[in-house]
Image (cartoon, rainbow, N blue to C red):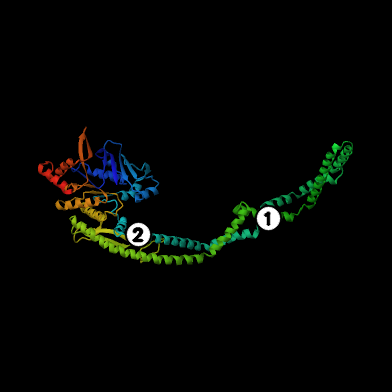
Amino acid sequence: MLSSLTIDNVILIEHQVLELGAGFNVLTGETGAGKSMVVGALDLVLGGRARPDSVRSGAREAEVAALFEIEPGSRVSIKLEAAGVPCDGELVVRRVVQAEGRSRAFLNGKVSTAAQLAELASDLCDIASQHESVSLTDPATHLEYLDAFGRLEHKRDALGEKVAELAVVVREIERVRAAERDRAEREDFLAFQLREIEELDVSPGEDTELESERARLRHAEKLQTTTQGAADRLYEGEETVCDNLARICSDVDAAAAIDPSLAPLARTVESARSELADVARALCRYASGIETSAERLAEVDDRWFRLQKLLRKHGPTTHELLAHRDELKGQLLRLAGAADLLSELEQKRDALLSRVALDARVLSRTRRDVAATLADAIGRELAGLGMGRARVVVDVSPVPAPHAGDLPAVDGARLTPSGIDRVEFLIAPNKGEDPRPLRKIASGGELSRALLALKRVLAEKGPAGLYVFDEVDAGVSGAIAEVIGRSIADVARHRQVLCITHLPQIAALADHHFVVGKSEQKERTTSNVRRLSEEERVSELARMIGGVKVGDAARRAARELLSAKK
């Protein structure tokens, strides 16, 4: 529902706040007063084209802001949430158009695009105005309207879930097939990597061990000389450290015989001599065990370089290298089982497709039955609106055959989450004409009445919260005008309606009456909109009935129209 529309500097409107009520709102005024400007401003916030000539002369920019009340969980609420736009029951849509033609859009203060506004438009408002309707003339919406009329949404949604499941299987089949096409080449590559690792037969931590052995072999002579020399100085040669410590220990023992407090020191010296003797023997064993084999060094160097090459590719540690080896084995096993997996998936696809195809055929047949009922209902409405010779067809036809990569076809039709049907409302306004799409109806009045008939039949089904009727009364008068008005009033019991009309029979049925007028100040023309009181409504309806000169007869007729509404 549209709560308010604020218009600044749009053509002749300098500043205007239009606060609509629930139910039936009507907008009247003399020709050229600016009624179409209100619709144009509303079209701007619904993503319509921004034109420089929509900016009031002398102004830098025009601005329109619309406040909509949004029901939690509604389609528009879900779309806003998906777009990251905060919404707590209200949506402010703002559009700014600069004099040079550039525009900016905002959704609840968040910068948006005209395309995003247009995406929300069909859920917010439907405008029927001289060949333009946001949703009902768009064939993409017709299937949803048909399903809503026939209460087929549950069947369609259930089918959509099965189609989604089928789509997952089809995508997996394509993935496995793609993998199968590359399987031989992939298998060779993986097997080569695995052989390279397994041939080296790496053990955990081997890189560290090889590094140590390689260092010992490369510096064997230095290590042997150093360790043997140290052993000799400690124990094996002349005047060794151990010999000197033995003499020191003997001297301290002798002194301890005189002073027993020196005995612990003598024992410490002896302990140090004993430990150094052990160190000397260990150094001697190390020196004698040093390998100086050039062949072994070459062997270690070769293995070390091969291991480093693998670690650069799959490491950097032997633990990661061995983990990669295990992953290679797993990939090769999966590739080996790809053929079996593909067979299983194809069987699952065929079983799912069989069930989905059956449901899609049943839904399609039901839609065709419902389409005939809907066409009859719209035809009866058109007859009441003065288009008794109009013929309505709700065309249910197969969706064009699938393209490569789509879901499998069902009876030659492309399978979609909504089934295998495309739906379009066709109307032949006059006898002898072929039915044509709504958007191709030549007469604006005929289009408006056709849309009114659709909207009355589908009043409880459409997503839009506001219906706008502009020029719906074109070419009619008298009893037909009253029928049209009552049809609009019937729609208004389910949806908020804004109707622009020149006919008093229609205006009198409204719940809220607004009039557009023009005034001149300082050689500038300005349009303004105001809500009428009950007495002012009488005057406006009398003007619409009697023309420029409003007499008592016109006023009586106006009061009769208003009382007839009650």
- Position of residue 273 measured from the top left corner of the image (x, y, whole percent): 83, 43
Could you say which quadrant of the image residue 458 lies in?
A: bottom left
474 and 434: which is toward the camera: 474
Q: Is residue 13 visible?
A: yes
Q: Is residue 393 visible?
A: no
400 and 501: which is toward the camera: 501
Residue 302 numbered tag = 1
Residue at 26 percent across and 41 percent down: it is 18
453 and 526: which is toward the camera: 453
Relative to 103, 167 lies left or right: right
- Position of residue 537 measured from the top left corner of the image (x, y, whole percent): 18, 42
Query: Which residue of the protein is positioned furthest toward the top in this rendering?
Result: 522
Task: Report the Cα–Cα distance between label 1 and label 2.
Answer: 71 Å
Relative to 348, 236 lies left or right: right
Residue bearing the label numbered 2: 154
The residue tagged with tag 2: helix, strand or loop?
A: helix
Residue type, mark 1 in image: Asp
Q: Is the Cβ of the residue at disc 1 closer than 8 Å to that at disc 2?
A: no
- Position of residue 76 measured from the top left corner of the image (x, y, whole percent): 34, 49
**Tag 2 or tag 1, which sits nearer the N-term?**
2
Which of the two marks, 1 or 2, is nearer to us in this view? 2
Is 360 drawn above or below residue 125 in the view shown? below
Mark 2 closeness class: few <14, some 14–19, many ≥20 residues within 10 Å: few
- Position of residue 474 measured from the top left corner of the image (x, y, whole percent): 18, 50
The tally of labels here is 2
Residue 209 numbered tag = none
Residue type, mark 2 in image: His
Relative to 390, 416 lies left or right: right
Mark 1 closeness class: few <14, some 14–19, many ≥20 residues within 10 Å: few
The residue tagged with tag 1: helix, strand or loop?
A: helix
